[in-house]
Amino acid sequence: MNLRKYLVVAGVTLFSAIGDTLLSRGMKQVGSISLAHASHVIWAIANPWVAFGILFLLGFFACYMTALSWADLTYVLPATSLGYVFLALIAKYHLHEQITATRWLGILLITAGVGFVAGGSELTHDPKRSARSKHEAVGQPVSLRGDR
């Protein structure tokens, strides 16, 4: 994986953790809302913390789509799970949440799982996928029977 790809995965991780933190802080200020009342949702979005959280989550979504364009979902999703570590640290030190030993153990297990996934290939080779992409690029019909 090259530096640009590492930066995209890091962007997914950081945008997600920061966006979720900002959203949480804003929603604690807003209080309980109901989807049955659209005005509550609009009022919540007007909160600066919620609005910035949404912007960061849009950044997450853009990076996530970019990562999925060159890597398998089974590689990208676990790699982005490192965000749980950042999220826990931000929640503990910025939101002053109490994180139990059980949660820290869960975060450690997630991190270990990311290590296993990162050791593998970012993209598995699928001849059908390659043929489909090649034909779609030139506007030709796709045949997956192997007779082309």
Image: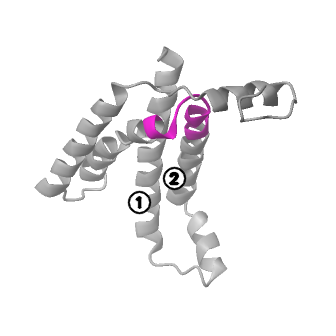
Residue 18 pos. (x, y %): 43, 45
Residue at which label 1 appears: 25
Mark identifier at residue 115: none
Q: Residue at x 62, y 27 (%)?
A: 127
SS under mark 2:
helix
As drawn, is 131 to the left or to the right of 79?
Answer: right
Residue 92 pos. (x, y %): 24, 51
Q: Residue at x 80, y 31 (%)?
A: 136
- Residue closest to the far left: 101
Residue type for callout 2: Gly
Q: Residue at x 19, y 59 (%)?
A: 98
CA gap, disc 1 to disc 2? 9 Å
Residue at which label 2 appears: 53
Q: Tell me, yes or no, whether the two marked residues, 1 and 2, touch with CB atoms within 8 Å.
A: yes
What range of the chain is rendered magenta? Answer: 63-75
Label 2 Cα crowd, 10 Å radius (few <14 / some 14-19 / many 20+): many
Would you say residue 100 is visible in this rendering? no
- Residue closest to the far bottom: 36
Q: Nearer the viewer, residue 52 or 99?
A: 99
Would you say residue 40 is visible in this rendering? yes
Q: Which is the main secondary structure of the residues drawn in magenta?
A: helix
Residue 50 pos. (x, y %): 52, 59
